[in-house]
Structures are given as structure tokens and as C-alpha cells.
Amino acid sequence: MSVRVDHVFVGGLQSLPPEGQLTGMFKAPVKGPTALGTTGLAGDRQGDPRHHGGVEKALHHYPAEHYDALAARWPELATRVGAGVLGENLSTRGMNEHDVCIGDIYALGSCRIQVSQPRQPCWKINHRLDTPGASMFVAETGIIGWYYRVLQTGQVAPGDVLELVERPTRWLTLALYWTTVLAHRPDFGLLRKIAAAPGLASDKVARLQERATWLEQNAC
């Protein structure tokens, strides 16, 4: 599987209306090669480093097709949503959560990157779009996007091809991961199987293992 990266986005910190929290969601497209390190693109910032950024969330990828779904749900957003609006670093068309698996390794420019986890939608999406319920819609429809860790640093640029080079866990799509963790009482055996998947972010591994243990101990 390979797709063209249409846009690469980088941004500093700005205030998010209406309350003024600092956020890195406001990003601008870069025109040429940009350095990619283990914690992200040169010049890119996150407003809440406790929950965003770092080695396990170095790059955020959001399919441009998902904006079509948002515009279909809220037609008034049609002229306001598009690539880059939700703070992604990479924008493509032609791949989504049903195509991408936890642990996938991709070549991009001179870099190697690995899918580490889906994005967890939060309240900032509501504020960014000035649309109550947008975050819940993103979560419930699974148009969530995902994060990469960087295995090999280098440079990336718009127009680069994102090419799959290794898929250690073919069965664990992001869509399956998401529907499983959202379930009220998922199968604890499946949670443990997911937790053992190569490439999954370490904090997600711990949470899944803890939840699996609780479910097993409290099974009806």
C-alpha cells in the first residue's frame, strides 16, 4: 500500500477560542523538505505535552476524506473544514482506519515511521470547529486519525510517497482496535491479544492489560 502525502503541516502555539487555551492545532503547510526527529517535525509544538506529542505521538495523520464526513453532518462547516484544520501533520487521500494496522511501518521521505495508536478525540475539536458534538461524532464514526513514532529520522516533504514496508499484525486494524476499546464489556482475551501487538504505544498496553484483568475478575 502506498499513497501520496498531499500536505505536511507544522505549527506553533496559539490561543484556542473561546477560552484561550494554548494549542498546536493551528498549523500551516510547509513547501519543502522538513526535518523529522524522534519527537516530531522541526518547529511543531503541542499545547498540552501531557497528552500530545512525544515519541509515541511524533506525527499525527488525518485522512482528508474525513472532512467530507464532517461537512456532510454539518453543512455549515463545508467551507471551513479541510486538510490541516484538526492539527494533523500529514494529510492524504486513499487510506483510512480500516486500511491501517497497529505496528505498520512506513517509508516516508528518508524516514521510517510506525503506527503507534489512534488519536483520541477530545473537546478541543468542538472548540476548533465551534461545533458542539463534533468530537463525539468523530469518535462514534471512527474518523479519528492516528499517530506514528519515528524509527528513522530524516526529512519529509509534501509530495513524498508513504509506502508500507512492514505489517507485523495484519489483523489489528485501527478500526478494530477502536471498536474494541469503545465496547462496554469487550472480550478480555481480545484485549490481551491487542496489548501484545508489536508497536502499540506502551501506555495503551498498560491500560488494556489493566482493563482485561478487571473484566476477567468481574466476569458475570
Image (spheres, rainbow, N blue to C red):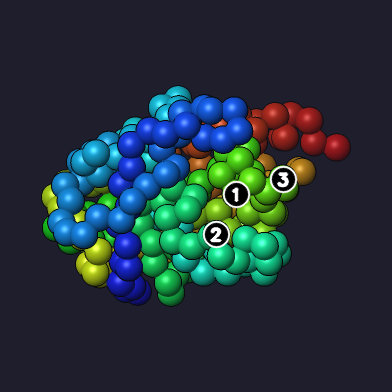
In the shown orientation, is residue 173 left or right of residue 148?
right
What kind of element bears circle 2?
loop
Mark-to-mark CA distance, 1 and 2: 8 Å
Label 1 sits on residue: 129
How many other residues sit within 10 Å of disc 2, few (<14), some (14-19) or many (≥20)? few
Q: Nearer the viewer, mark 2 or mark 3?
A: 2
Label placed on residue 1? none
Q: Give me the residue at 25% from left, 55% from top.
A: 30
| Amino acid at the residue labelled 1 | Leu
Sooner in the amino-acid sequence: mark 1 or mark 2: 2
Instruction: From the top left corner, tell me how far across and down residue 66 is, in percent.
Output: 55, 64
In the shown orientation, is residue 36 left or right of residue 89?
left
What kind of element bears circle 3?
loop
Quarter the N terminus occupies: bottom left
Can residue 130 be seen by looking at this rendering? yes
Pointer 1 with pointer 2, Cβ within 8 A: yes
Q: Give me the residue at 15% from left, 56% from top.
A: 33
Label 3 sits on residue: 132
| Amino acid at the residue labelled 2 | Arg
Label 2 sits on residue: 80
Q: Nearer the viewer, residue 1 or 31?
A: 31
Pointer 2 with pointer 3, Cβ within 8 A: no
What kind of element bears circle 1?
helix
Q: Give me the residue at 38% from left, 62% from top.
A: 91
Q: Residue furthest right?
A: 220
In the shown orientation, is residue 4 left or right of residue 157?
right
Pointer 3 with pointer 1, Cβ within 8 A: no
Can residue 186 be seen by looking at this rendering? no
In the shown orientation, is residue 195 left or right of residue 182?
left
Residue 53: quadrant of the picture: top left
Q: Give me the residue at 53% from left, 60% from top.
A: 81
How many other residues sit within 10 Å of disc 1, few (<14), some (14-19) or many (≥20)? some
